[in-house]
Amino acid sequence: MSALSHKIDFAIIFSVKNANPNGDPLNGNRPRTDYDGFGEITDVCLKRKMRDRLQTAGHAIFVQSDEKKTDGMVSLKARAESDEYGLGKNAFKPSKDNTKDEIAKKVCAKWLDVRAFGQVFAFGKEGDAAGVSIAIRGPVTIQSAFSHEPVSITSTQITKSVNSEGDGTKKGSDTMGMKHRVDSAVYVVYGAMTPQLADKTGFSDADADNIKAILPKLFEGDASSARPEGSMAVSKVIWWQHNSKAGQYSSAKVHGSLAVNADGSFELKRLDGLDPEEIDGF
């Protein structure tokens, strides 16, 4: 399968209503904000959602979350060395016929998220692959998402009706808690796909189309008590496909051609020879 033939830029506009889109564990799990009060969702959080949607769509994913893993592997190391994926323990043992480049090609061929986002395969001091570290740079990058305006955060104290432990004669220390939510906000995130790196991982036009297909439903199947079903929704995906591997414009200029308003509407500054595709959210 040939590698990605065109540079691609994309943007996702989405809304958050009465939800905690990305809690900060260092701040009592309050929704993340920057120093100016704008809401933030990290790139790691967004890639987790992309992986989950790709996995639901039937694609092989290496970094599976514990809640959604489908192969029963207890760790990434176990998955990497599993016979189930046709690799085995000796697959990561470098040799004359099994160089680090060859190992990288094998894992990229097996897992879509590895050839898309990259991965570091680092092994400890024991076993056949002792001390091996293989770093793979992926062609798909995504930034952190930020809200259009500073967000209003509501914090609510909650109380459990039962004790988790004890004899039941008095309330335990864990019966009281806090929940936080963003009342209403519009966020935007930008990303890109680089053919030069796709040549090394084997990321193809078909892989790009698979990612394109899941972006409009990025938050489907992601419901929790912090993010009730329907509280986060993609309103629009903007997809710029350049006419060459190098691209007609820099990603900075392409991303700068999009202006998002507080209500989620947007304006696009047209760039000569680069017509964006506008895709509605699900």
Image (cartoon, rainbow, N blue to C red):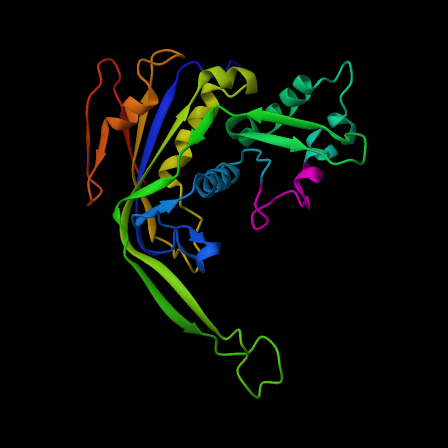
Residue 67 is covered by the magenta coloring: yes
Q: Is residue 111 left or right of residue 45?
A: right
Q: Please, which residue is most extreme toward the bottom here?
A: 169
Query: Which residue does the image show at 42% across and 67% down from the upper left?
Result: 178
Closer to the camera, 219 or 42? 42
Figure check: 18 above or below 276: below
- Name the image quarter holding residue 250: top left
Figure check: 103 above or below 18: above
Image coords of residue 254 (percent x, y): 29, 23
Q: What stretch is highlighted in magenta?
A: 64-79
Dominant secondary structure, magenta: loop
Residue 173 is covered by the magenta coloring: no
Mark count:
0
Query: Which residue does the image show at 78% across and 27% down from the upper left?
Result: 90
- Name the image quarter holding residue 177: bottom left
Image coords of residue 114 (percent x, y): 56, 29
